[in-house]
Structures are given as structure tokens and as C-alpha cells.
Image (tube, rainbow, N blue to C red):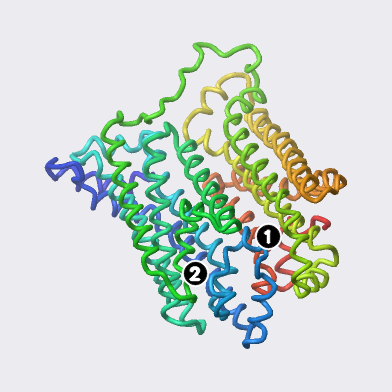
Amino acid sequence: MATATVAPVLGALENQPRSGPVTGWPSILRLQLRLDRIKSLVWIASVVALVVVSAISVSELYPDEASVQGYARLVSDNAAVVVQAGPGYGLQTDPSTGAVLMNELSLWTIVLVGLMSILLVTRHTRSEEETERAELLRSTPVGRHAAGLATMVNALLVNVVAAGAVILGTIASGFGAVGSIAFGLALCTSGLLFAAISLVAAQVAATGRAATGIGLAVLAVSFLLRAIGDVTGSFLTWLSPIGIGQGVRAFADERWWTPVLSLGLAAGVTWLAAVLAARRDFGAGMIPERAGRPAATRWIQGPFALALRLQRGALLGWFCGIVFFSAFYGALASEAEEMLADNPDLEQFFALSAGSSITDAFLASAVLILALLLAGYGISGVLRLSGEENNGRVEALLATPTTRTRWACGHLLVTAIGCVGVAAAGGLAVGIGAAVTTGDSSLVAEMLWALLAYVPAVGVLAGVAFVLWAWVPRLAILGWVGLVWSAVVGLLAQLLDLPDWVVSLSPLDHVPS
């Protein structure tokens, strides 16, 4: 946090009396908006660009009723599509290009604004307390809940601007105003709900990394609950913020009460965060960190062992998450086979697009998603170097005979071994799940090697993040751009009709099928 940026705010806060629990929140909000001006614009531009380009592509790919009806037949009762897109509101009763757009886009756009909101809230709450920068503001007459209120207003403004731009962009692309407004409201209220959840996580966790992990875990669980609920037609969909957001049924007989539900839940969760904040000590979490040993054990006295000790929690979390997702996708493989009997159009589609069976095509899609998650672990592991440096924990280590190169190589080696181990476990999980449901035991080895084949490409993405950190530490965060682009190419290349040379910019695109 630059001194030149903070100083005017501190001066304004020092000149006001302390009169309430939220005193000073407007000044803190102005500081946050100034600090986030670039990040917020990038997030908003990314969301809007994704929606507008997708809207234009859908209009070109499905220009008439016949093409829309063909799409509806392809995805009708397709469990694999439901898991990766949604229930397809309106496609069975009144197919339209708007319904096609929502089926292709709504899930991932809600996930994107959820991720944006989680990172924004954690950055301005728990991370500020962890690095002790928040003490600068607390030394002035500000209320206990001022930072939390300012952060939620910040999240509200960012989500409102993103939603408003999405509404205008969708209407400008030729889609109806009513459905566009419903979609925008769903995005805004879903983002606010995830922001409120992240605010609770900031009270519970003792570190910014743990708070972010809790927020991302809730996002992942929301995805799973929505997927299971949509496939089985159960109430589980309504336990998921993502499911509630998609439940607005944009362009398909809109249900306007679902954004109100999301907004009400966001208000309730925010109130819970305020209650928790009032009951904890400043700088501490509701779940305190376990006290460490007074001295390091023999096995931890080395760069590699220290890096493993620091990363073991994150590694375990990514390991469990990817293995769980892998088993879940593998268990759906039999659903893909059963769809062929009743949908010859779907069989022809997969034969033309993948040149293989529908089971192979579905599993290839599942492995790609797992590879994207694996890349997320790889990049986060490498960027742990940046976190350790920014938090001031490296100086004491480098004061010993340990060199900067040995310290960095320790973290890189842990991340590399972790990527291989997680990929192997994930490949086995999806293979075993598919083998159990389809009866084809050969899928175990095939899926194992399929996911391991992505490890070099993941290494490229992680390597780019490392180079950015080593070159200009402030640019380290741009390491995530490669993952975002790979996700866009892998998940939306056909929808966006991207040229081959653009697709080839993704390292994951060069992995053999």
C-alpha cells in the first residue's frame, strides 16, 4: 500500500471524531477504490468482453429457429452438459437464442463474478489485517466495522457496474431487454452473495490465504451442489448461490424473486460477519492459528522441507478438491453413454467434433477442466514466493547461509512434485469412477496418462508466473492471466469461433488428445 496513496486518507480520518462502529467508512471506501482502480477495471472488462463476444457468437452460430431447435435437441436431458452448463431453462419449452446464450454462458459468468468478489473482499479485510497495514487505519478515529462496510460497498459498486455493462452489451448484441436485465441482476446479486460469504470467511480465518481458501471452497461446493441438484432435479440446486443465480431463468419466463433471494441472503450473511467481527480480537480469526514449535525440528531445516511445511495445507486442499471433482466427473461417464440411445443427433455431433465415442469426448472435456484446476494449484504454489516476500518472512531466512536461489528452488520443487502427485491422483480418481460406472477397466490407465500429459503445459503456465515474479515482483499477479486465457480457449473456443493462431496461445491446447 503506497504511502502517497494512504497519507491523504489518514489525514482525513484523523480530523473526524470517533462516534460509531462505522465511522470513517467513506474515506476507507475512497482509498479502496483508488487502490483497486486497475484491478476492478480489468475484472469488469473481462466479464463484459466474455458476455458480449459470446452473445455475438451465439447469434451467428444459431441465426434461425431450426438451428436453435437443433441445439436444444443436442443438450436435452444431457447430464454431461447439465453439469458443465446448467439445466437449460427454456430449451425444452420455448427454445431461443437467449436461452442458448444462458445455457452456454450463465454458469461460468456467475463463477467469474463470484471469484472476483471473493478476492476483492479478502484483499481488503483479512489480508490487510494479516500484513498489519490495517493498523494504520485503526490508529485513527474509525469504527470497528468501517472497513467491512466499505469493502461491501466496494463489492456492490463493482458488481453493479459489471452487471450494468453486461446488460447494455447484451442488448446491443441483439438480445431482448427483459432477459438481459434478468441476467444482469443475477450476476450482481450472486457476486454480492459471494462477497458476503467471503466477509464471513475473513472473520473465521486467521490469514488471507486461509480466508481465500474458504471462499473458493464455498464456490466449489456451490458448483457441485448446483450440478447434483440440476442432474437429479432435487432441492440441492437451491442450496447453491450459483443455482439461485441461474434460477432467474433469463430469456425463459423470468423469475424475478431469485435475485431478491440472493440479495436477502447476502444481507443476512453480511450481518453474520458483523456479529463475528464484534466478537473477535483485531488481527485474529475466530479459528486461531495453532501455536508453532519453539524451534524447528531436524527434518524442516532446509529450503525444500520448509517450503513443504508452508505449502502442505494448500497442497492438501487442492489434492482433495481435484480428487473429489475427478471422481464426480468419472461417475457421470455412464450417463454420457446412455444418452446415445435416445438422441441420434447428439451421437452425430460428437462423432463430428471429437471423432470418437461420446464417453471419450465427455471424459476429454472433464480432463481439460481438471487440468485447469491443476494449473491453478501450480500457479498458486509458485506465487507463494511472492507472498512470503511481501509478508516480510524471507529476510530472516536469507540472513542465514541459504541463498535466494536455493529458497526459490525449494518452493518450485514442492510445487512440481505436488503437480505430478495431484495429477496422478486425479487421473486415477476419474478413471476409477468411469471404470466403475461403464465397466471398462482400461479407462483407469487412460485417464491417468491423460491428466499426467497436461503436467508439462501446467509447468509452462507456472513458469510464466515465476518469470514475472523474478523479473518484476509487482507483475507476479499477471501469472493468472495465462490460466484465464487457457480456460477461455478450452471451454469457449468453439462458441467464440476463435482463430487457430489465437487458440494456440494456450499451452493446454498443445497437449495431444
Q: Which residue is depicted at the point 63% across and 81% down?
A: 68
Compare residues 497 and 414 and report the one nearer the observer: 497
Tell me which amino acid carries mark 2.
Val
Distance from the alpha carbon under mark 1 to that under mark 2: 27 Å
Q: What residue does disc 2 label?
A: 48
The answer to whether residue 123 is above or below residue 255 is above
Tell me which amino acid carries mark 1.
Ala
* Number of residues whose C-alpha sits closer than 10 Å to that of mark 2, classed few (under 14), some (14–19) or many (20 or more): many
Q: Which residue is depicted at the point 48% across and 61% down?
A: 42
Quadrant where the image shows the C terminus: bottom right
Query: Closer to the N terminus: mark 1 or mark 2?
Result: 2
The answer to whether residue 374 is above or below residue 226 is above
* Front disc: 1 or 2: 1
For numbered disc 2, what is the local secondary structure? helix
Q: What residue does disc 1 label?
A: 80
* Number of residues whose C-alpha sits closer than 10 Å to that of mark 1, classed few (under 14), some (14–19) or many (20 or more): many
Q: Quadrant location of residue 164? A: bottom left
Q: Is residue 508 left or right of residue 85?
A: right
Compare residues 51 and 80 and report the one nearer the observer: 80
For numbered disc 1, what is the local secondary structure? helix
Q: Which residue is depicted at the point 73% across and 38% down?
A: 425
- Give the image location of residue 271, x and y in percent: 28, 45
- Give the image location of residue 274, x and y in percent: 28, 41
Quadrant where the image shows the N terminus: top left
Q: Which residue is depicted at the point 55% across and 48% down?
A: 220
Q: Quadrant location of residue 50? A: bottom right
- Give the image location of residue 140, x and y in percent: 21, 38
- Give the image location of residue 360, x and y in percent: 81, 58
